[in-house]
Structure formats: C-alpha cells, structure tokens
Image: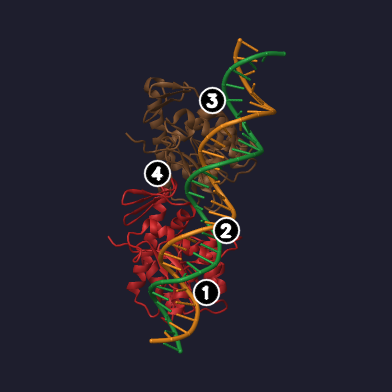
Chain colours: A red, B brown, C green, D orange
DNA sequence: ACCATTTGTGATGGTTCTGTGACACTATCT
DNA sequence: AGATAGTGTCACAGAACCATCACAAATGGT
C-alpha cells in the first residue's frame, strides 16, 4: 500500500485530504509542523509527500530542501496559499514535482496525486523489465542501460555529459533542476566552474534532439530557475 | 524440478519468497548467512541463487565472487536494501545477472525470476544444438566451447584474453562495459594494472576480426565509457 | 633452457568532448 | 520604452580520451 505523508498545520485541510486519500486506499501519515514533517519524511519512507509552504517551526522550503538532500526520488507536492509566481518558482527550484495553490478543488487535487503516482509507476515498470530501462516520450526513446537514444527510430549520438543530462531530466519529467543542482548531480559537488557551462550542454543536447530549436519539445526552460523535461509531450 | 537457493538473513523475506517460489513449483533451499549460503551454493547445484547483499559472517559480494569462481553459469539475483546502496554497475561488475532493491513487490520479483529462467532456457537451447554454443553475428561466428572463431568461414587465431573479451562482449550485444568492468570480469578483481591495458587488447582483437580498422563493425567504442559489441550488424 | 607467443606498459599522435568568453537575444520590471 | 538579468548561440583552445605501435617482461610448450 502506498504511503502519503501530509505536512500541513491547518488541521481542517489535513482531515479533508486524509479522507480522500484514504478513499483511494493510500495509507496517510500526518505531520503538523516542519520539524515533525522532516523527521517523518526521513524515517517513514513515504511514496509521496504533500508539503505546505507556510509551516510552524520550519519553513516548507527548508523541509523540501532537506528531504531532497536525502531522498532524491520521493515525489513532493507543494501547497501554497498565495498564487504568487515567486512561491511557484521557489517551489520548483527546490525540486518539488508539482504544486497546487490554495484554495484548490478536491477533484483537481486527486487528479494530480494520481498523475504523480502514474508517473512513478511508469518509471518503476520501465526499470523492472530486466535489462530494459527505457524512457519513452513522444518520438524519443532512451535506453538507459545501453546508453542509446533514438529519435523517430534513428539513433542519436550523444556525448557523455549530454546523455547524463538527458537521463536525469527525463527520469523526472516536470521537475525543474537549477544549474547548480545539475552541476552537483552530474559534474559532482567538487566542480568549480561556471553555471553557464550547463547552458552550453543543454544547447548542444537540444540541437541533437529538438526538431525545432525555437520551440523545444523535450528540454524546456524554467525561467529564472533552470531546466526541466516536458511532462506533457504532444502526440 | 528447478532448484532455487535463497541466501538471506531476514527470515520473513525468506518465508515470503519461499511461498511464491513454491507456487511456481520450484524447489527451495534456504541459507541464513554467507558461509552457509556459499557452502550450499557449491554443493546443491542450484539453478538460481537469490543473494542478499548484507549478510552475517560473509558479505554478499564475497559470496557472489566465490560462487562465480566455481560455477560460472549459475544465475545470481542480488537483493539490496536501497537503490542508493548499490550502483547497478557494481552489481553487474561482480557478475550478478540481475538485482532487485528492497522493498520490492512480489509481482516484480516473480517477473524477474521468470525472466532469468527464460534467459537460461534460451542459452540452454542454443547449447543443445549439437552441443555447440555458437554466437553468430554478420560474417563472424564464435564457437564458445571449442574456443574457435570463424570470420567468413576462415579460422581466426585469438589469444586467450582476446577470446574472452570477444565472448563476453558478444554475449551481450549493445551493452557497454567500462574498462574497469572488463578488468574485473576477465582479469579478475585482484588485478592491479592500468585500465589502458584493455585498449591494447581491444586493439589487437580488432586487427584480427575487423575488416576495416577505421570503421569497426563488431567491437565498438562507447565514448567516455568503454566498449560494446555491435547489436545491429549490417546485412 | 630455448623459442614462440602472449601480455602489460610507455610513448605518441589523433579525435572527440568540454569549459569558457563574447555577443545576440528574450523575458521581466519600472 | 529602457534597463536589467537571464538565456541562446557560436567558435575555439585546452582537456580528456582513444588508437596505435614498439618493446620488454611474463608465459607456456618442447
């Protein structure tokens, strides 16, 4: 059974979410402040964390960061009170997978939760078929094990860095990575170069896989933040 | 009836696996620590070994190595606690055929066990053809048992290392092996020489089997990674 | 012990990749 | 619109990586 951790100080909202998550037969764990939330996130190994931005004791942003530092793969959905862009951007920068602004409709909330699990499920399944870790998206297919990328069935030659970038981004569609994060994750934390280096590699990668450079379909830019893989490929 | 050996100290997991393996009508042998596991692996002649990475008395890696040293063909499936704990590469480097991270779904576990047996079956069948394990690819045919390689019907004389390299690569077309992996798998994990040694052997091997050295058809280079056998031999 | 073969390593030259600077371009805000 | 900060593009030099060759040490058979 899937575990969902809710970190939210408004008990009414927690109640509401719990009821509906329970209907979907998920196990629900609750935390009412940042510290408690972080602790439970690290110990309970939840399959999804729902995280309010404004929290007592420890800010949602900080909680998100700390979770990411340890559990890279756990999906996080942010709740924010104001629909201001700043909040959204910050949320993405920390590596949240999705965000939703209060007040939200339960219908929408459930749809998003399902979407997140569906995505996680896809990754799980593609990994499980032995030897075949394949990520598919539109006309693009990535055979991770074989280090092979096909675009419309035609093999694309990528350099090591380009390949690693593509795989990292494509494994978490919709999640934005800052240039700093990408440098840490791919180049290593001891790399001391310019962040602008990432631009070049993204650019080279795009020239190889994007049909139209002025209108990228796979590698998207999150302005002011970094890059992400498109989560809704047309067709 | 197929025999499956489970080496795992967590008795709950052993129980669980046993039940499901029994359903598939496999005979199950159990061992609860590394030493016992190795002993039973060597005496019982199992068709599949399921091996936990963390074990009392003797580490799973060591057990894996020792089994491999004696029984080259027995498939081994590794169990690891966390996905971060072990790199996919490391598992394969030790010679495990597959690995699965805990916690895992029984469904997935069974799928993988079946896949391993299916693969073993395939190899078995190709072996039974007049007792010859033959790998064919383009104009190249490798008779593994006889240590004989034919190019366009003409015998090619290969040194031991060259032959082993060729067989290992040709057995898994498309999969790239790093120089470190090749050293571990062919030279042995205790070899302490330069990785660049592999280059020389690949080079010598190529001069013997490649029609055009500037455009290899069989042994390809995966830049920044290592070498692989071409999976799509032209006509 | 002798010879032939195999094998590891050093050296060298060639190829690909990668980081960076410079500049054009775009989004955002006042 | 203008100012500013963020992003796209491109070329190039240096770095990283690979192929090749030569040679000495190790190996193995006779």
Secondary element under disc 4, as helix, strand or loop, is: helix
Find residue A118 and report its horizontal and vertical position in percent.
36, 60
Secondary element under disc 3, as helix, strand or loop, is: loop
**Residues at discs 2 and 3 in contact (Cβ within 8 Å):** no
4 or 2: mark nearer the eye = 2
The subunit letter for the residue under badge 3 reads: B
Residues at marks 4 and 1 on the same chain: no
Find residue B131 and report its horizontal and vertical position in percent.
41, 21
Work out whether residue A145 or residue A152 is closer to the camera in this orientation and state it.
Answer: A152
Find residue B123 and report its horizontal and vertical position in percent.
41, 30
Q: Which residue is mark 1?
A: A61
Q: Is residue B205 above or below residue A45?
A: above
1 or 2: mark nearer the eye = 2
Q: Which residue is mark 4?
A: B111
Q: Earlier in the sequence, mark 3 or mark 4?
A: 4
Q: Residue at x 42, y 33 (%)?
A: B212
Secondary element under disc 2, as helix, strand or loop, is: loop
Residues at marks 4 and 2 on the same chain: no
Q: Residue at x 33, y 48 (%)?
A: A154
1 or 3: mark nearer the eye = 3
A197 lies left or right of B231: right
């Amino acid at each position: 059974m899937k575990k969902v951790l809710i970190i939210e100080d408004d008990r009414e909202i927690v109640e509401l979410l719990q009821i509906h998550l329970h209907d979907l037969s998920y196990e629900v764990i609750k935390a009412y402040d940042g510290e408690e939330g972080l602790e439970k996130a690290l110990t309970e190994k939840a399959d999804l964390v729902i995280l309010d931005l404004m929290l007592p004791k420890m800010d949602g942003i900080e909680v998100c960061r700390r979770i990411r530092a340890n559990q890279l793969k756990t999906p996080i959905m942010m709740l924010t009170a104001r629909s201001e862009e700043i909040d959204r951007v910050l949320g993405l920068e920390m590596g949240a997978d999705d965000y939703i602004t209060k007040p939200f409709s339960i219908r929408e909330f459930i749809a998003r939760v399902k979407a997140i699990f569906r995505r996680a499920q896809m990754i799980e399944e593609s990994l499980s078929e032995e030897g075949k870790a394949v990520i598919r998206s539109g006309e693009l297919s990535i055979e991770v094990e074989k280090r092979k990328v096909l675009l419309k069935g035609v093999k694309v030659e990528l350099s090591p860095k380009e390949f690693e970038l593509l795989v990292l981004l494509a494994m978490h569609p919709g999640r934005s990575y800052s240039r700093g994060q990408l440098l840490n994750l791919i180049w290593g934390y001891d790399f001391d170069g310019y962040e602008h280096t990432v631009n070049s590699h993204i650019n080279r990668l795009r020239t190889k896989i994007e049909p139209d450079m002025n209108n990228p379909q796979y590698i998207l830019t999150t302005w002011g933040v970094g890059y992400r893989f498109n989560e809704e490929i047309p067709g």
